[in-house]
Image: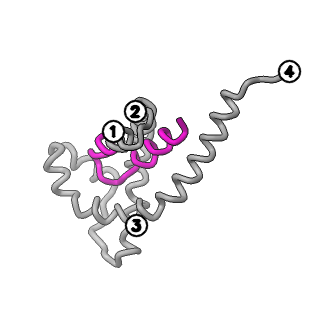
Amino acid sequence: LSLALTSGAVIGVFPVLGIATVACTGVAALYRLNLPAIQLANYLVFPMQIILFFPFLYIGEVLTGNSLDEISKTKLLETFDLGFLPAIQELTQYFILASPGWALALAPLFAVLYFVLKKLITLRFQPKTE
């Protein structure tokens, strides 16, 4: 269960909007993880996907040496008023540049979250001895 929840949370903050649900479904099928649990974690971290987009973008800019015009949270969200596909087309370069930042944060984020959840789940469902 902790592996499914961690996978859903880490995939859920991937900076390319619109593919986390499909990616979570694929990972759940490939590794035979609990699909409702992975999707629940994915949906719960959706606000974090927007918030973490900017640190991931900054890390991607530092790693690659590329820089794009600064984009604000308001501008990012307003772009989706144009519609999903036009927004994706307009923001593709930002998504691509933010992806290395996510990839760099992936391993430590996954490890910490997995072991914390595993410990919490074990404590919660451990038989009580008197």
Residue 6 or 68: which is nearer the viewer?
6
Residue type, mark 2 in image: Leu
Label 2, residues with CA under 10 Å away: few <14, some 14-19, many ≥20 = some
* Residue drawn at point x = 63 percent, y = 34 percent: 121
Q: Nearer the viewer, mark 3 or mark 4?
A: 4
- Give above or below for 127 relative to 28: above
Magenta highlight range: 1-23
Q: Tell which circle, 3 or 4, labels the residue nearer the N-terminal end.
A: 3
Indicate the position of residue 36 as horizontal and vertical percent values.
41, 29
Label 4, residues with CA under 10 Å away: few <14, some 14-19, many ≥20 = few
* Residue drawn at point x = 29 percent, y = 48 percent: 17
Q: Which residue is mark 3?
A: 58
Q: Tell which circle, 2 or 1, labels the residue nearer the N-terminal end.
A: 1
Q: Is residue 15 highlighted in magenta?
A: yes
Q: CA distance from mark 3 to mark 1?
A: 29 Å
Residue type, mark 4 in image: Glu
Q: Which residue is mark 2?
A: 35
Indicate the position of residue 86 as horizontal and vertical percent values.
14, 50
Residue 45 or 110: which is nearer the viewer?
110
> In which quadrant of the rendered image does the C terminus lie?
top right
Q: Specify the principal SS of the magenta part.
A: helix
Q: Which residue is mark 1?
A: 25
Q: Is residue 88 left or right of residue 35?
A: left
Q: Which residue is mark 4?
A: 130
Residue 93's quadrant in the figure?
bottom left
